[in-house]
Amino acid sequence: MQQEKDSTSRRSFLLKGLAVGGAIGTGLVVGGLPAFAEAGTGSLTQGDAAILRFLAAAEILESDLWQQYNELGGIQDSEVPGGSGNAAYTAALAVLDADMAQYIHDNTEDEISHFTFINAYLASKGAATVNLDKFRTLPSSKATGAQQIGRLTNLMQLTVDTSWWTKYRSRSKNPDFGDTFPPAIPGLLKGKFAAIPRSNADLAPKKHIQAIANTAGFHFGFIEQGGTSLYPSLAQRVTDAEVLRILLSIGPTETAHFQTWHDKAGNAPALTDPTNGLVFPDLNAAPFGGQDFQTNLIMPEPTIFLSRKFPVCSIIRPTETVGAAMGALKALTDDGLFIGQSQEFFAVLADLAKQADAAQRGV
Ligand SMILES: [Fe+2]
């Protein structure tokens, strides 16, 4: 029992260290989290704890970005407090759907509940939890409605990959086979664009704030399709049945979000932003249009899965488990979401991802 007591006190130390963030030595965090992985798992396997911790981190990051959207374009209430709304941005989002503010609110609340639950579950098992508060250093929007607090994520310089649009429409390709997909909005890959107004100067002209709302509309889909793949990808390496239940229960809510956003993005009006030339083309007209771009084809098309010898199947894609956590981190980084973050932030996130990717089922 003495041994168990020792490991408990080591765990307590690490939990405390994580909770205060800054108290953790960079050697411990950046150097592959040796003690963290060894002593911070409690009664969970090392792999299950690592997978849950990476997911907690991903959900904290998601909550931070959704919180920014909600402050300016959602509904600020007791469920998702903070901010006071921005009328011009909210109206531009409402062009995509009259209920956009409600959907943004609900997506935000869901993400907050995800990281809060996963951290509470980790703690209940005596495992170290995740706290990224020390990295809340990025600036807020200066537009009316946003809180002036430090942020983890940057929504003002995004390079949004909209290939998820064609990926889910393809009947013959699958990213797990190495296939690539054209973006729905090529212009979004050719620069850095705001998905929230950076200041009140972004509220006009009308086509500019609409382009910002359109960018947000496609970014919502990008973020939630990532979560849609991440959970099934990592679930394949979970050991404990209850941890598997957590992943199988949270993951599909990301898919519910994605399905909604896929539908709404198709309502983004075709336009050219007069301030920067960003083009949102008519996806129903040439050279777009057809099955790969048509805006009402919002459900996944059947495609190749596991092997070409099988009949096509309507599936989440990708679901390859090897390198899934690092792949998710890279996608968010390439999105521009972390522009301005510190080296230490990237090191901590990379370590969490590496630990999750090292998890093995049954070990
Ligand atoms: Fe989530």
Image (cartoon, rainbow, N blue to C red):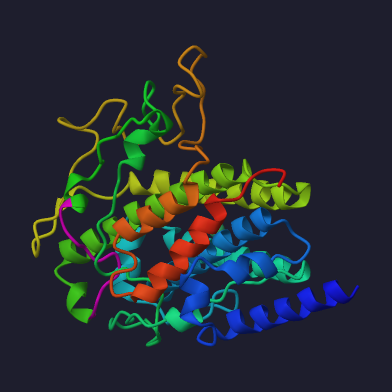
Q: Please indicate, yes or no, whether residue 226 appears anywhere in the rendered image.
A: yes
Q: Residue drawn at (27%, 26%), measured in percent from left and top? A: 290
Q: Residue furthest front?
A: 3
Observer-nearest of 199 and 155: 155
Q: Is residue 343 shown above or below 46? A: below
Answer with the quarter of the image where residue 200 lies. Answer: bottom left
Q: Nearer the viewer, residue 300 or 334?
A: 334
Measured along the vertical axis of the image, is residue 278 above or below residue 298?
below
Magenta range is 190-199
| Residue 191 is a magenta residue | yes
The quadrant where ligand 1 appears is bottom right
Residue at 25%, 36% (x, y): give it.
182
Q: Position of residue 63 (x, y in %)?
A: 50, 68
The residue under the point 53% across, 75% down is 28
Side of 8 relative to 302 (left or right): right
Is residue 142 positioned above or below 171 on the image?
A: below
Q: Is residue 69 visible?
A: no
Residue closer to the observer: 264 or 170: 170
Most prominent secondary structure in the magenta stretch? loop
Is residue 352 found left or right of 45 in the rendered image?
A: left
94 is within the stretch colored magenta: no
Q: Is residue 11 left or right of residue 303?
A: right
Residue 342 is situated, as x and y percent measured from the top left of the image, at 34, 76
